[in-house]
Image: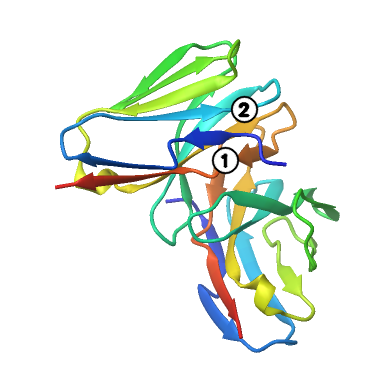
Amino acid sequence: SQQGEEDPQALSIQEGENATMNCSYKTSINNLQWYRQNSGRGLVHLILIRSNEREKHSGRLRVTLDTSKKSSSLLITASRAADTASYFCATDAWNNDMRFGAGTRLTVKP
Amino acid sequence: EADIYQTPRYLVIGTGKKITLECSQTMGHDKMYWYQQDPGMELHLIHYSYGVNSTEKGDLSSESTVSRIRTEHFPLTLESARPSHTSQYLCASFSGRYSETQYFGPGTRLLVL
């Protein structure tokens, strides 16, 4: 069953702007991860945040986690055309079998 | 780049054919997964394995089967392909001991005519 659900489904911004994507999930988790997928390719891991963490940074990426609301957000700052891709959140519910949402399709216009 | 490979990358076949999608990884990961993904849609877990001789069905009802005779190899077989099987199939592996992230192969795009 699908666990994470991303919002919005699609996002179009100009280069240099920030992009924010949200993810909601249903059950308690061990950790939440964000992945990126370029068109027609496999997924690439971006960042992992554990259930006892509230915020994490990696380069231009900032992830927050609110376990009370069962939600997470991914912020990409100073976006570039090369950031154009689909972004998925995945939840790990303690058995290491992750469930992925439908993804947010981000388009960054030059 | 992760050391996980899928072949073929693209496959066009006729209805009723038996096909095997190959997935192999050289990272010694115990856990391997197959996902089915339609364009622009979510990933659906169809099969997974926790190690040699271990296979389980995932969330999505699938007419495919898998085997895990060797740690590095996790092939997916469709006994009789149908147009409804047209999709992208993604293989992933996961260490569980040293890392909590899944590594994905490039995927196989299957078109059944």
Q: Is residue B79 above or below residue B63?
A: below
Spatial CA span between label 2 and label 1: 9 Å
Quadrant in which residue B34 is drawn? bottom right
List x then y, in percent, for residue B37: 58, 58
Name the disc covering residue B21, or none.
none
- Front residue of B66/A75: it is A75
The disc labelled 1 sits on which kind of residue? Gly
Pick out the residue farthest to the right: B53
Q: What residue did someone put label 1 on? A: A101
- Front residue of B99/A97: it is A97
Q: What residue did someone put label 2 on? A: A25
Q: Going 66% across and 51% down the picture, which residue do you hit? A: B44
The disc labelled 2 sits on which kind of residue? Tyr
The colour style of the image is rainbow
Which type of secondary structure does the marked residue at label 2 adopt? loop
List x then y, in percent, for residue B57: 81, 53
Query: Mark 1, chain letter?
Result: A
Q: Is residue A68 above or below residue A62?
A: above
Q: Going 48% across and 11% down the picture, which residue do you hit? A: A54
